[in-house]
C-alpha cells in the first residue's frame, strides 16, 4: 500500500520519515515517492494494508545499485495492545526501464 495512504497518525508519519531519511543518507541524490503505485483497479486488487511501499528514484542510473528506481516494501504488523506498528521485514526491488533487475528480502527463509 502506498506510504501516503498509510499515514493515519503522527507515529506513522515519523516512521515513514525515518525510513526515507535513512535511505537518503546513503543515496542523497534520490527522490522519494510516497505513492509508487498507480491508483487503478489492478493495483487495488494487490493492495496490502500490512505494507508501507516507498519508491526511490535516481536522476540517472546508479552503478552501486545497478538500477534507476528502487521499490521498498516494509512489512508491518499492528500491535493492538500498544496501538503501534512493528516492522517484520523489508523487501527491495531494483528496476531499470520497467524491468526488475534484482530483489532482496529479509522476510522468510533467505
Image (cartoon, rainbow, N blue to C red):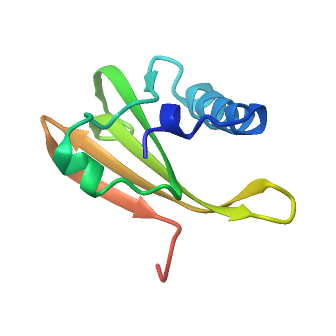
Task: In the rendered view, tell whether residue 49 sits above or below residue 13.
Answer: below
Residue 43: where, in percent of width, then height? Answer: 24, 47
Task: In the rendered view, tell whether residue 18 sits above or below residue 75.
Answer: above
Q: Which of 62 and 18 is in front in this view?
A: 18
Q: Which of 29 and 87 is in front in this view?
A: 87
Residue pictured at 48% horizontal, 83% vertical: 109
Task: In the rendered view, tell whether residue 24 sits above or below residue 76.
Answer: above
Dividing the picture into quadrants, the one containing residue 102 is bottom left
Residue 27: where, in percent of width, then height? Answer: 51, 27
Residue pictured at 36% horizontal, 39% vertical: 70
Residue pictured at 59% horizontal, 31% vertical: 20
Residue pictured at 46% horizontal, 17% vertical: 29
Residue 4: where, in percent of width, then height? Answer: 50, 31
The residue most toward the bottom is 109
The answer to whether residue 107 is left or right of residue 62 is right
The answer to whether residue 84 is left or right of residue 60 is right
Residue 80: where, in percent of width, then height? Answer: 78, 64
Amino acid at each position: 500500500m502506498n506510504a501516503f495512504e498509510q499515514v493515519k497518525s503522527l507515529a506513522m508519519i515519523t516512521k515513514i520519515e525515518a525510513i526515507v531519511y535513512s535511505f537518503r543518507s546513503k543515496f542523497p541524490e534520490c527522490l522519494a515517492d510516497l505513492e509508487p503505485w498507480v491508483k487503478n483497479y489492478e493495483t487495488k486488487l494487490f493492495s496490502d494494508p500490512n505494507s508501507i511501499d516507498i519508491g526511490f528514484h535516481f536522476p540517472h542510473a546508479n552503478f552501486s545499485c545497478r538500477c534507476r528506481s528502487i521499490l521498498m516494501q516494509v512489512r508491518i504488523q499492528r500491535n493492538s495492545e500498544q496501538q503501534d506498528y512493528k516492522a517484520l521485514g523489508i523487501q527491495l526491488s531494483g528496476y531499470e526501464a520497467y524491468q526488475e533487475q534484482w530483489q532482496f528480502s529479509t522476510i522468510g527463509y533467505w
